[in-house]
Amino acid sequence: ASAKKWIAGNYLNITNSLALKLLADTQGCSGAIASLELSSRQGASLAAKSPLPVSFFIYSAVRLMTTRQCLLEYRCGKKTSGKSCYYSCAGEESIDAVRGKSLRICKRKWNHTELYDSSFLSIPDIVTDLSGTASGFIIDLRLLSFSGHNSENIPEITAAFKQLIDNPDTKGKNRINQLCVNVSRGNAAKGLS
């Protein structure tokens, strides 16, 4: 019997060819999503050496941490999280971080607490940089309170990204930059050291 096919997601923090080789040797793994921390140059090198198809996010929320600890404990007075928190608690808060950058605490029902960068990662430039090496590009259009999109402009944003992927040009990048607000380029230029 053949194993179910699966893709190694971006929260596995795939940053090197050894990780891709190990995944390729894992039963059923049919692809991988590269870490959001890579630069375009690092992503191209990774995809070129990969035994698996590698996809890249070009627009995404940046989750920094997932924890079982409740970061919203002041709301209910509990010191630790329990089953009732996991199943029923929901809330969101903003906290100030180092160097004036804000972070978002998000707790959704049936999920652990997550800590996000307050701006979405938007790197349409990598479509051109990775053409020929990337197997695909991914856009994250979850409706989080801090996202620079809403349910009304998702179809337009989707069309703009599709057009950019089909025909990477400056006009397409400029349209995406107009539509997507509250964004950063993350590590796209610097990458990992």
Image (cartoon, rainbow, N blue to C red):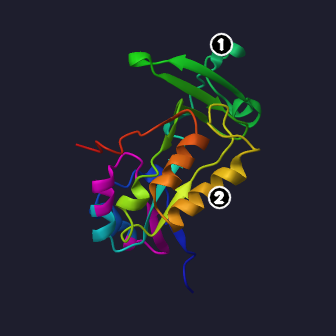
For residue 87, above or below residue 38: above
Residue 84, percent from left and from top: 74, 31
Task: Classify 45 as above or below 102.
Answer: below
**Residue 26: within the magenta?**
yes
Q: Nearer the viewer, residue 163 or 144?
A: 163
The residue wearing badge 1 is 74
Give the percent coordinates (x, y) of residue 34: 41, 57
x 59%, y 50%: residue: 140
**Dot 2, crowdedness within 10 Å: few (<14), some or many (≥20)?**
few
Q: Residue 30 appears at what percent x and percent y? A: 48, 73
Please tell me whether mark 2 sits on a helix, a strand or a loop. helix
Question: Is residue 41 rendered to the left or right of residue 93?
Answer: left
Q: Amino acid at mark 1?
A: Tyr
Q: Residue flagged by tag 2: what amino acid is it?
A: Ala
Q: Is residue 87 left or right of residue 117?
A: right
Closer to the camera in the image, 144 or 51:
144
**Residue occupied by mark 2:** 159
Say if residue 34 shows up in the picture: no
Q: How many marks?
A: 2
* Residue at 71 percent of width and 30 percent of height: 85
- Residue at 47 percent of width and 49 percent of height: 11
* Figure quadrant of residue 131: bottom left
> Most extreme residue toward the bottom, as rendered?
1
- 50 vs 59, left or right, is left
Q: CA distance from mark 2 to mark 1?
A: 42 Å
Q: Which residue range is magenta in the image?
A: 24-44
Please say whether residue 108 is one of the residues in the magenta stretch.
Answer: no
Image quarter (top left, top right, bottom left or bottom right) of the N terminus:
bottom right
Image side of residue 35 versus residue 70, left or right: left
